[in-house]
Image: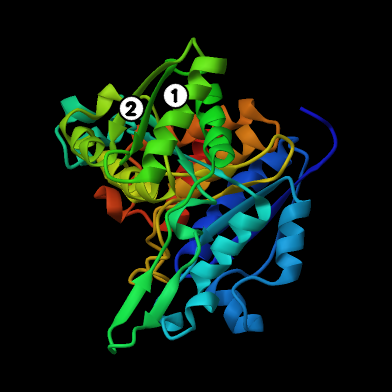
Amino acid sequence: MSTAAKTLLLLPGDGIGPEVTAVARRVAGRLISQGLALEISEAPFGGAAIDAGGTPISDETVAAALAADAVLMGAVGGPHWADQPFDNRPEAGLLRLRAAMNVYANLRPARCFNALADASSLKRIFVENLDILFVRELTGGVYFGTPRGIETLENGERRGVNTHVYTSSEIRRVARIAFELARGRKREVVSAEKGNVMEAGLLWRQEVQALRDAEYPDIALSHMLADNMAMQLVKNPKQFDTILTDNLFGDILSDQAAMLTGSLGMLPSAAIGDAGKPGLYEPIHGSAPDIAGRGVANPCAAILSFAMALRYSLGAPELADRVEAAVSAALDGGARTADLGGNLSTAAMGDAVLAQLG
């Protein structure tokens, strides 16, 4: 690891975001005290940024994110900002940040810690040792396509329009990341789309196959319709290793797989782009306004998101292994927040992880 200090921008956000990222910052602080060269700064984001300056993310925060080595965020949104215009809601700040950082590949691991296998809605036999990596395209597709909006027709009816659109280069760049990551796993990729009814899905299938044939003949590639994958994830999730999806289906399918692991509170994510550019890391859970401020949220997803930052952006994969092992050991020792059937507070769960980290 380089002796030059890396930089991490922390965006706590809304709801439980500040609570769980505070614990992740404590974990980072422990590693800094043990020699990790890391400088941490912080900025308001989402609804908190709207309250502070009228916009969900400021130009200054975008610039800080682009200048950092990694960005770790909590969560955004909540009923307090429901009346904001669509383009100024907390979620709009997240979409702007992703686009500005050009983090087009979302990595969502669905890993079931053995200590939590019985917390899944499926039987232990289906989820024990489950380890799926979703690679989701993040800056294209229906969430970003134009035209979009709500319009009033001549007959008085209202019509909502969203456009699902992809180019070959957008597909190939995220597929390349999936194939590269698969080389470090089981060398198997399943690509999901709806090419039977969507032209953009057919293009996705064709471009992914062409890239595999040209550059990754060592990777076993198969294609699956997204609705069938939804069924297969419940029927036999361990058949999957690396899954490649577009933005919309990846959002849905990875959340479905998340619940196989026992709790959304356990699952991190990474959003990365071109080599050498900063990555964006966040737990996949939302802001959970119903429990915000009570100190009961599970911080493990935020801690594991920091571990992913160590692995992919901060040049410290060995420390990522240590953090992940500490979370696993804390769970093996019986540490549980309410979402896992326990009664530990957010801070106490952090204490359990730190005790294992040493």
How far is disc 1 from disc 2 in space, using C-alphas?
Answer: 9 Å
What amino acid does circle 2 point to? His
Q: Residue at x 41, y 81 (%)?
A: 82
- Of the image marks 1 and 2, the number of the one nearer the N terminus: 1
Q: Check disc 2: other Cα within 10 Å, few if <14, some if 14-19, many if 20+.
A: some
**In x, y percent, where is residue 262?**
27, 43
Hey, what amino acid is under mark 1?
Answer: Gln
Q: Quadrant of residue 220?
A: top left
Q: Which residue is mark 1?
A: 209
Q: Please say which color scheme the image uses.
A: rainbow
Number of marks in picture: 2
- Element marked by disc 2: strand
**Image coordinates for residue 78, horizontal then vertical, percent:** 42, 74
Closer-to-camera residue (254/357): 254
How many residues crowd mark 1 within 10 Å: few (<14), some (14–19), many (20+)? some
Residue depicted at x 81% and y 30%: 2
Residue shown at 46%/71% (left/top)?
A: 77
The one nearer the camera, 299 or 230, is 230
Residue furthest to the top in view is 218
> Which mark, residue 19?
none
In the rendered image, which quarter is residue 357 located in? top right
Work out whether residue 330 can be spotted: no
Q: Nearer the viewer, residue 264 or 155?
A: 155
Q: Is residue 339 above or below residue 232?
A: below
Toward the viewer: 214 or 68?
Answer: 214
Are circles 1 and 2 on residues that touch, CB within 8 Å? yes
Kindly identify which residue carries mark 2.
223
Q: Residue furthest right?
A: 4
Residue 93 percent coordinates (x, y): 57, 68
| Residue 179 seen in the figure | yes
Q: Position of residue 33 (x, y in %)?
A: 72, 41
- Quadrant of the image containing the C terminus: top right
